[in-house]
């Protein structure tokens, strides 16, 4: 009872401490309530959710063969399970230690589950789609662009002029080209450059284009981290007789990546959302499915339902990523203070 | 026994006409504790950092543990050979903040000397208890006081079983009440016969532990004397002036 009273008192202090505060608070609260009411009224009475319920498999798995739906289904469930494990922070240390490995193997596992091979019937990448494809594009591009970005960042600080200049030029050029142009390049020009007979499917081309683009930004984030590490750390390593390569890997990079973690999270969330650009280039990932569903005469005009669903899915994914990143950040600082 | 460090006519200038090292010749014998004193900017740190290749020099000869260092273009392997046998302790400790105390100490033995993890950890623990901080082994540097961190830094330098230890103002960044715990650790090392070059402003330490005092100003060696002579009866006017200044502080 006393607790409840202090909560009310606290609310009063925060929102209604004087006349101006009270007016502003009232306006904001009434706008919020009106919006919420209107929205829920529309969602319950006016909306026709059949467009979502009928097409749900399409939104989740694209046009994956019906009898094989367990494969993308299993893969997406694993994403949820891994996320939960990471956020909850398991008690068993063996599981905590293998988390990184789990996440790194997540992308390749997805490719295997989707494409098939070794006991699984093969499925062409044209049939991949929906949420599955969005997660595939994001996870594979992220896994490839992180090491490439780190390499570019280190290259930019190299003492060898060729490496240094090439890295700088690459980073600067990539950062001055719009993503959509790079994606077009990936879809239309990469096939022209390849020797006859060698063909890369559209999904791989998209992953290559995303990797090339994102790694330039990651390189700059990592460079920021590298620059925040004092030169004396390098000296301390040198004095111990460590090899320059060991100094970089064991002393400088772990600290730099910790500093760069918030901006790297930013890149990951941005990457997730940017995969929706592939809808323009003909891949039926989440947004692409939405567009093709809306093009179906049966569901014409059901824009709001579809885009609300898409927004909700992207929001859940983005929030999961942010939570995981925050958890990682806390872990890394807790380690130092909690023992 | 040949000297551990033999420097002849070392010269280094950062910009024209201003010398960080001006024609310095000096040798350090095995088991000797050489204390380097002098006002700030006199080149003390530069001198001690040339001994393990952190700084280059422009001309002169330098020989550390029988390994010659050239004025230019030293082979990196040569420098690393010296560093494996020479430990260094910095003013700002320079521990690795992302590693536990134990990992800070075992990193180099495991990665450079390729020793077994178990063995390296046992050695590290015995070094830590020698420094009186064995209970902190699992902690991280940020959880320790300055004096404790500096003792970890000494243990880290000792873990490679060096033949020479370089100290670059090891107590200058510490709170006054923490200075003695570090100096005591260094004193014990000197008693065990460790060869040391120590840049410091601690007069008592220099008096009691130093075998010789090297006084520098503007990159030059002003005088080299035993502590008895230097502190009671310094040969040079410049040395006496400096001593007065730091005594009155």
Image (cartoon, grey):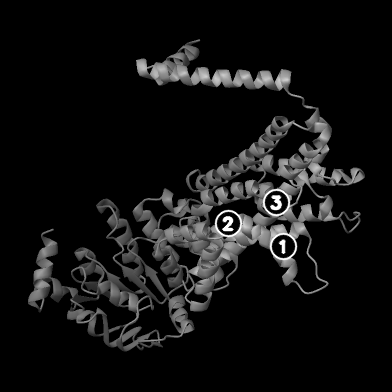
Q: Chain of mark 2?
A: A
Q: Chain of mark 1?
A: A
With A193 as the anchor, is B238 left or right in this view? left
Q: Chain of mark 3?
A: A
Residue A217 spot, x, y in % from top left:
55, 58
Local SS, label 3: helix
- Mark 3 nearby-residue class (10 Å; few <14, some 14–19, many ≥20): many
Pointer 3 residue: A278
Question: In the image, which is nearer the foreground, mark 1 or mark 3?
Answer: 1
Of the pair A27 and A332, the residue shown nearer to us: A27
With A164 as the anchor, is B191 left or right in this view? left
- Mark 2 nearby-residue class (10 Å; few <14, some 14–19, many ≥20): few
Residue A175 spot, x, y in % from top left:
54, 60
Of the pair A104 and B169, the residue shown nearer to us: A104
Residue located at (47% from left, 74% from top): A241
Residue located at (84% from left, 45% from top): A63
With B130 as the anchor, is B236 left or right in this view? left
Q: Mark 1 vs mark 3: same chain?
A: yes
Residue located at (35% from left, 65% from top): B90
Of pointers 2 and 3, the one earlier in the residue sequence: 2
Local SS, label 2: loop
Pointer 1 residue: A188
State the mark number for residue A178. 2
Residue B224 spot, x, y in % from top left:
19, 80
The CA distance from mark 2 to mark 1 is 16 Å
Q: Mark yes or no: residue B232 visible.
A: yes
The CA distance from mark 2 to mark 3 is 14 Å
Of pointers 2 and 1, the one earlier in the residue sequence: 2
Local SS, label 1: helix
Of pointers 1 and 3, the one earlier in the residue sequence: 1
Residue located at (29% from left, 60% from top): B171
């Amino acid at each position: 009872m006393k607790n409840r009273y202090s909560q009310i008192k606290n609310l009063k202090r925060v929102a209604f401490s004087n006349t101006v505060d009270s007016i502003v608070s009232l306006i904001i609260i009434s706008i919020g309530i009106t919006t919420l009411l209107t929205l829920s009224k529309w969602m319950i009475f006016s909306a026709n959710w059949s467009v979502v319920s009928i097409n749900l498999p399409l939104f989740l798995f694209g046009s994956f063969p019906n009898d094989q739906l367990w494969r993308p289904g299993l893969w997406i469930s694993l994403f949820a399970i891994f996320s939960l494990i990471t956020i909850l922070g398991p008690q068993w240390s063996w599981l905590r230690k293998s988390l990184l490995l789990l996440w790194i193997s997540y992308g390749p596992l997805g490719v295997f589950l989707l494409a098939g091979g070794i006991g699984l019937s093969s499925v062409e990448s044209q049939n991949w789609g929906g949420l599955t494809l969005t997660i595939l594009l994001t996870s594979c591009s992220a896994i490839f662009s992180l090491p490439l970005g780190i390499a570019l960042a280190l290259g930019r600080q190299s003492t060898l002029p060729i490496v240094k200049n090439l890295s700088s030029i690459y980073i600067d050029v990539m950062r001055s080209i719009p993503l959509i142009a790079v994606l077009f390049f990936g879809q239309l020009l990469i096939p022209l450059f390849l020797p006859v007979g060698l063909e890369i499917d559209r999904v791989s081309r998209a992953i290559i284009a995303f990797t090339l683009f994102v790694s330039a930004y990651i390189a700059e984030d990592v460079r920021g981290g590298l620059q925040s590490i004092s030169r004396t750390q390098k000296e301390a390593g040198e004095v111990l007789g460590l090899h320059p390569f060991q100094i970089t890997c064991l002393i400088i990079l772990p600290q730099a990546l910790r500093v760069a973690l918030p901006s790297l999270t930013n890149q990951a969330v941005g990457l997730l959302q940017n995969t929706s650009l592939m809808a323009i280039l003909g891949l039926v990932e989440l947004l692409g499915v939405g567009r093709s569903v809306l093009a179906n005469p049966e569901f014409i005009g059901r824009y709001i339902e579809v885009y609300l669903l898409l927004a909700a899915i992207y929001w859940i994914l983005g929030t999961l990523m942010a939570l995981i990143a925050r958890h990682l950040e806390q872990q890394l600082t807790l380690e130092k203070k909690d023992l | 026994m040949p000297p551990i460090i033999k420097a002849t006519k070392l010269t280094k200038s950062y910009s024209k006409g201003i010398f960080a090292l001006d024609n310095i010749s000096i040798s350090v014998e095995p088991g000797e504790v050489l204390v380097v004193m002098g006002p700030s900017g006199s080149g003390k740190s530069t001198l001690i950092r040339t001994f393990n290749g952190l700084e280059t020099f422009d001309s002169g000869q330098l020989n550390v543990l029988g390994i010659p260092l050239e004025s230019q273009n030293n082979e990196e392997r040569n420098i690393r050979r010296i560093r494996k046998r020479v430990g260094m302790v910095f003013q700002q400790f320079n521990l690795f903040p992302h590693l536990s105390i134990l990992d800070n100490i075992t990193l180099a033995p495991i990665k450079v000397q390729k020793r077994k993890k178990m063995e390296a950890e046992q050695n590290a623990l015995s070094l830590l208890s020698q420094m009186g901080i064995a209970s902190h082994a699992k902690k991280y540097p940020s959880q320790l006081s300055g004096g404790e961190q500096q003792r970890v830094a000494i243990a880290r330098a000792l873990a490679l079983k060096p033949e020479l230890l370089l100290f670059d103002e090891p107590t200058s960044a510490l709170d006054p009440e923490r200075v003695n715990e570090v100096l005591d650790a260094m004193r014990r090392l000197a008693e065990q016969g460790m060869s040391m070059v120590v840049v410091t402003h601690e007069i008592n330490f220099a008096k009691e532990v130093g075998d010789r005092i090297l006084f520098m100003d503007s990159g030059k060696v002003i005088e080299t004397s035993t502590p008895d002579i230097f502190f009671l009866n310094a040969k040079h006017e410049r040395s006496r002036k400096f001593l007065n200044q730091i005594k009155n502080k």
